[in-house]
Image (cartoon, grey):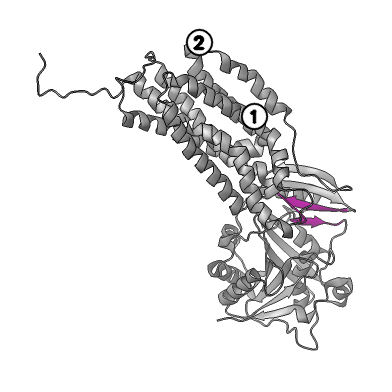
C-alpha cells in the first residue's frame, strides 16, 4: 500500500499512441535536430546570395528573406505541433526532412527561372526600385517558404518523440531539442559565411545542406529499418552537381571575364568595347569599377574623374598622399595616376572590405599594390582602417557603397566625418562620391549638410553630367574655389580640354552651423 504523502507522477503521455522505446532513439533524434538547425541557417544565409544577381543584397532584400523565413517557420511550428499527435510521428519527420533535402538540391535549378519572372532582363537601375522590393519578396516566397515551412515542423515533432520515448516532461524535452537545434544553427551560420559560400559556391553549399538533411532523415529511419532515405544519397548529389549556373543574361557583344561569389556579393568582370567593368550583384546599368587601357580620365558620365581636381588646385612639384576608402578595383587611383600635375608624386593607400574585389583588381584592372607608394588594405572596414593608418593625408576619398545604392550608415555620420577631418593635413581635401539625381536630391543635401557640420565650414557640390552622381568637396582649413568667380577653373587646360571643365552653374555651396 503506497503512502498517501508520496508524490504522484502524472504520465502526460499515457493516452498518446506509443512508439517502441529505444535507448538510441533520443541520440538519433537530437542529431537529426542539430542537422536540421544547420540546414535552416544555410538556407537562410545563402538565400540572399542566390538572389543577388537579380535583386542585390540590400537591407530590403535581407528583410524580405528573413521575414518570409520567419513566417514559414511559424507556420511550420504550428503544423509540426499538429503532426506530432500522429500515431507514428517519426515517419512524418523522415518525410519532412526528405522533402527539404530534395528542395535544397533543386534550389540552384529554380532560382534562375523564378527570379526571371519577377525581374525581367533589360530593366535599368532607375526603373527597378519597386521591382527590387516586391520582386525579391515574391521570389523569397516561392523559393524559400516551402523548405523553411517544413523545417519548422522538425522541432515540435522531435519534442514529442523525446517525450514519448523517455516518458519525459515536455519542458525538459523541449529544452534539449532547442539546445541541439541552436548548436546546429551556430555551425550552419559560421560555416555558410566563412567557408561554404566563398570557398565552395552556392551549388555546393545547397548540395551539402541537402546531404546534411538526408543524413538527418537516415538517423531517424535506419534504426527502424526504413531504407527509403538512403536513396537520396544518390539523388541529391546528382541534382546538385547537374544544376546550371543560372545568371542574368548579358547583352550581345559583352564578354564575361570572371564570376566570383564573395562573402559580401556576387561579382562579375565584363569586357566591352576595349574597356572593362566590375559589376556587383544585380548590376542593371550600374558598375563598381572601370578600366581603360591607358590610365587617366575615363570620360563623360564617370564620376571617378572628379577626384582629380584637388591635386591641380594645389599646384605642381609636391608629394600628394591620398587615402581611398572604398578602393574597389582601383579606378580612382588609376585615373589620378594618369593626370598628375607636373612634378607631383602620388602616394596611395586604399581600403577595400572585399578581398575578392582586390584580387580581381590585380588581375583585370591593373591594381598595383605592395609597393612603397601603393598600399592596399584588403578585408578591412573603412572606418576601422581610418583609425589604424594614422598620419595626415592631402586627400581622403570616400567611395564606399553597399549594393550599388546604399551608403553604409556608419560612414555617413557627423562623428565619422569628424574623424576624416582629423585625418587630413591642414588644407587637405575630402572628396565624396554621392549617388543622387541632382543637387536637390534629398541624400545629396543630407550628406552635404552633415559634412559641413563636421568640418564646420562650407562644402561644394557638383553634379556629374550624364550620371546619377554628385561630387562633394570639403577642406580642412583653407579656402574652396569660388565657382562664381571669373577666374574659376578646374585644374589645367589639358583637363578642361579632356572634358573635366566643371560648369560653375552645377556647383552649390552647403550651409554650415
- The quadrant the N terminus occupies is top left
| Sequence-first tag of 1 and 2 | 1
Task: Name the mark on residue 225.
Answer: 2
Q: Foreground residue, 472 or 65? A: 65
Q: Which residue is mark 1?
A: 105
509 left or right, relative to 9: right
Q: Where 135 falls versus 346 (above or below)?
A: above
Q: Left or right: where does residue 34 sit relative to residue 296? A: left
Q: Name the quadrant of the C terminus.
A: bottom right
Toward the top, the furthest residue is: 225
At 63% from the left and 45% from the top, the residue drawn is 138
Residue 393 screen position, x and y as percent: 66, 68
Disc 2 secondary structure class: loop
**Segment tinted magenta in the rendering:** 275-292
Residue under the image location 52 percent in, 35 percent down: 149
Question: Is residue 200 something that shows in the picture?
Answer: yes
Amino acid at each position: 500500500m503506497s503512502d498517501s504523502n508520496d508524490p504522484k507522477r502524472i504520465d502526460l503521455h499515457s493516452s498518446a499512441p506509443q512508439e517502441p522505446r529505444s535507448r538510441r532513439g533520443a541520440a538519433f533524434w537530437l542529431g537529426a535536430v542539430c542537422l536540421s538547425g544547420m540546414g535552416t541557417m544555410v538556407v537562410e544565409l545563402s538565400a540572399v546570395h542566390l538572389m543577388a544577381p537579380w535583386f542585390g543584397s540590400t537591407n530590403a532584400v535581407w528583410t524580405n528573406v528573413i521575414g518570409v523565413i520567419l513566417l514559414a517557420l511559424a507556420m511550420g511550428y504550428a503544423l509540426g505541433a499538429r503532426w506530432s499527435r500522429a500515431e507514428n510521428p517519426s515517419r512524418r519527420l523522415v518525410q519532412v526532412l526528405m522533402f527539404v533535402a530534395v528542395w535544397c538540391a533543386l534550389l540552384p535549378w529554380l532560382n534562375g527561372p523564378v527570379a526571371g519572372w519577377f525581374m525581367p532582363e533589360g530593366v535599368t537601375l532607375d526603373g527597378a526600385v519597386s521591382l527590387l522590393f516586391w520582386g525579391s519578396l515574391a521570389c523569397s516566397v516561392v523559393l524559400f517558404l516551402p523548405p523553411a515551412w517544413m523545417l519548422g515542423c522538425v522541432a515540435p515533432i522531435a519534442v514529442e518523440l523525446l517525450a514519448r520515448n523517455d516518458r519525459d516532461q515536455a519542458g525538459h524535452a523541449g529544452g534539449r531539442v532547442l539546445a541541439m537545434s541552436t548548436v546546429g544553427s551556430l555551425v550552419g551560420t559560421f560555416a555558410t559565411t566563412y567557408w561554404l559560400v566563398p570557398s565552395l559556391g552556392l551549388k555546393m553549399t545547397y548540395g551539402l545542406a541537402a546531404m546534411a538533411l538526408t543524413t538527418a532523415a537516415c538517423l531517424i529511419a535506419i534504426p527502424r529499418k526504413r531504407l527509403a532515405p538512403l536513396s537520396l544519397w544518390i539523388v541529391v548529389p546528382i541534382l546538385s552537381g547537374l544544376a546550371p549556373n543560372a545568371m542574368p543574361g548579358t547583352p550581345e557583344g559583352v564578354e564575361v571575364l570572371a564570376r566570383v561569389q564573395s562573402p559580401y556579393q556576387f561579382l562579375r568582370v565584363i569586357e566591352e568595347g576595349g574597356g572593362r567593368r566590375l559589376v556587383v550583384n544585380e548590376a542593371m546599368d550600374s558598375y563598381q569599377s572601370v578600366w581603360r587601357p591607358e590610365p587617366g580620365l575615363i570620360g563623360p558620365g564617370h564620376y571617378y574623374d572628379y577626384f582629380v581636381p584637388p591635386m591641380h588646385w594645389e599646384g605642381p612639384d609636391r608629394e600628394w598622399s591620398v587615402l581611398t576608402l572604398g578602393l574597389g578595383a582601383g579606378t580612382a587611383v588609376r585615373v589620378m595616376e594618369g593626370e598628375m600635375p607636373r612634378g607631383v608624386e602620388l602616394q596611395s593607400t586604399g581600403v577595400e572590405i572585399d578581398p575578392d574585389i582586390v584580387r580581381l583588381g590585380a588581375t583585370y584592372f591593373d591594381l598595383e599594390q605592395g609597393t612603397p607608394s601603393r598600399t592596399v588594405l584588403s578585408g578591412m572596414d573603412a572606418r576601422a582602417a581610418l583609425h589604424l593608418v594614422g598620419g595626415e593625408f592631402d586627400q581622403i576619398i570616400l567611395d564606399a557603397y553597399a549594393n550599388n545604392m546604399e551608403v553604409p550608415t556608419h560612414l555617413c555620420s557627423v562623428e565619422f566625418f569628424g574623424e576624416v577631418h582629423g585625418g587630413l593635413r591642414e588644407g587637405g581635401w575630402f572628396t565624396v562620391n554621392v549617388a543622387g539625381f541632382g543637387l536637390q536630391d534629398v541624400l545629396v543635401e543630407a550628406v552635404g549638410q552633415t559634412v559641413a557640420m563636421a568640418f564646420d565650414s562650407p562644402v561644394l557640390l557638383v553634379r556629374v553630367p550624364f550620371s546619377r552622381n554628385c561630387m562633394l568637396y570639403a577642406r580642412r582649413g583653407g579656402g574652396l574655389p569660388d565657382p562664381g568667380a571669373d577666374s574659376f577653373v578646374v585644374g589645367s587646360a589639358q583637363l578642361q580640354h579632356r572634358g573635366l571643365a566643371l560648369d560653375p552653374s552645377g556647383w552649390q555651396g552647403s550651409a554650415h552651423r
